[in-house]
Structures are given as C-alpha cells and as structure tokens.
C-alpha cells in the first residue's frame, strides 16, 4: 500500500507573510474610504478622522514591511510583484479621492489643488504602469529607485497631514496659540502636498527618460 503524497499544488500552499500584508493593505483601503466618507450626522468627524488616520498609517506601514520581509527572507513571488504595486495605487488614489470629497469644500483653492493632485497621481500611475507592461514584453524589469521611494513617502506624509492637521486645530489650547489665518489655510497640508506633487512629477519624468529607449513606435 503506497503512502499518500502531500498535495503540493499552488492552491494548497499557504500565502507567505509579505503577501498576507499586501492583501491586508488592499482590504484596508475600502474600509478607510467608507469610514472617511461617513456623514457627520452619523459619526463625529473627529472620530472618523482618527480611525481613518490610523487605518491609512497602518496600511502605509504594511507597505514598507512587506517588501523588506520579502527581500530579506527570499519570499518574493509573482503574486507579490503584481499585487504590491497595485495595492499601493489603490491606497494612494483611494486616499486622495477621499481627501477631495471630505476636505475639498474647505476653500475653492483647496478644492482645485486636491483635484489637480488626484489627476496628476492617476495620470502618472497609469503612464508608469503602461511603460512597465511594454518593458516587460522586452524582458526588461526596472526596479524602484530612490526617487520613486521618496515619492511614495511624501504622498503618505501628505495624506496623513491632510487628515490630521484640521483635527489638531480643534484642540482648544492649540487653536488659541495659532493665528486664524494659519488654522483656516492649513499650511502644513499645502506644504506637504506641493512637495509630494514635485516628487510625483519628477519621478515620473525620470521613469519616462529611462524607459523611452524601450518604446518602439513601429511595434
């Protein structure tokens, strides 16, 4: 009587830790979006802001952890290569959409700024993703460079600041210390947003310059 061989098919293999973190990040995005879009009549905006900030920052931490763990312990998989950048795009674009919905009405200038920011990020990510697909057909894999990593960090800081800054000004003693123009114009949000957009555009241009040699208009 022969012994039963263990099932080693892909469906029987358990997902490794980096991939679990990636899936967790994807699952956190819709929860974050729903929480941040809850009307004030249902839940106080301070509560949804705190929960939203916690969810976004936690998702950002998993973004930094899964890649490091995968590289350190040689757990890089095709699933991770596909889903990790996709999860990042879901996280950032979802967050910027929520910001436009929730904070765009603070002032006309902010509404325009958040709209432009969202469009820049969406167009940049679509362009870079398309270039990666073209390059992959040529067998070329371009690893994320330092500029791209800085871009991601500045976007995370921008989103976190946009959520947290208005709540800080509702703290009584802090609101009294700062002038009215400061609390009404959210300068930290503007500053971090401008920095994030500079690195978003800059890293996109650099990526185009690197990948341009692999674009053949006759193919």
Image: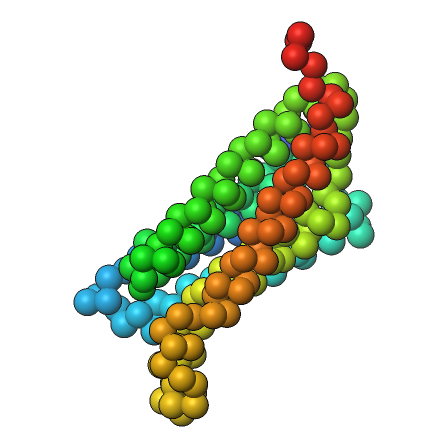
Q: Nearer the viewer, residue 205 or 173?
A: 205
Query: In the rendered image of this protein, does residue 147 appear above or below residue 133?
Result: below
Res 185 → quadrant: bottom left
- The residue under the point 44% across, 47% down is 116
Outermost residue, top direction?
Answer: 218
The image shows residue 192 at horizontal and vertical percentages of: 55, 63
- The residue at 59%/58% (across/down) is 195
Task: Kindly tell me whether residue 16 is visible in this rendering.
Answer: no
Residue 174, image quadrant: bottom left
Residue 161 in the image: state x and y as whole percent: 49, 67
Seen at 35% across and 67% down, the residue is: 48
From the viewer's perspective, is 147 left or right of 42? right
Q: Classify 99 as above or below 8.
A: below
Determine the residue positioned at 37% across, 51% down.
Answer: 112
Viewport quadrant of the N terminus: top right
Give the camera-side residue of 2 and 33: 33
Q: In the image, residue 107 lies at what x, y percent? A: 32, 62
- Quarter of the picture containing the C terminus is top right
Q: Is residue 115 left or right of residue 62?
A: left
Residue 154: x %, y % from top left: 60, 58
Count of numbered marks:
0
**Residue 125: quarter of image:** top right
138 or 219, nearer to the observer? 219
Q: Nearer the viewer, residue 178 or 173?
A: 178
* Residue located farthest toward the left when viewing the structure as drawn: 41
Q: Is residue 200 above or below residue 168?
A: above
Does residue 111 appear in this view? yes
Picture colour scheme: rainbow
């Amino acid at each position: 009587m022969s012994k039963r061989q263990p099932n080693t098919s892909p469906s029987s293999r358990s997902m490794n830790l980096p991939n679990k973190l990636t899936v967790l990040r994807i699952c956190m995005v819709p929860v974050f979006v729903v929480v941040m879009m809850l009307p004030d009549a249902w839940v106080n905006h301070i509560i949804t802001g705190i929960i939203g900030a916690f969810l976004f920052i936690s998702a950002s931490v998993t973004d930094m952890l899964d890649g490091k763990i995968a590289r350190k312990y040689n757990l890089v998989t095709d699933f991770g290569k596909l889903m990790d950048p996709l999860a990042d795009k879901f996280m950032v674009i979802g967050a910027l959409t929520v910001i436009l919905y929730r904070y765009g009405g603070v002032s006309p200038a902010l509404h325009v700024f958040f709209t432009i920011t969202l469009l820049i990020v969406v167009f940049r990510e679509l362009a870079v993703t398309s270039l990666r697909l073209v390059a992959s057909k040529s067998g070329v894999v371009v690893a994320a460079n330092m500029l791209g990593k800085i871009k991601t960090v500045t976007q995370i800081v921008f989103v976190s600041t946009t959520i947290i800054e208005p709540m800080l000004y509702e703290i009584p003693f802090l609101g009294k210390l700062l002038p009215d123009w400061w609390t009404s114009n959210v300068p930290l949000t503007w500053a971090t947003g401008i920095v994030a957009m500079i690195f978003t555009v800059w890293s996109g241009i650099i990526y185009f310059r690197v990948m341009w040699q692999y674009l053949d208009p006759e193919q």
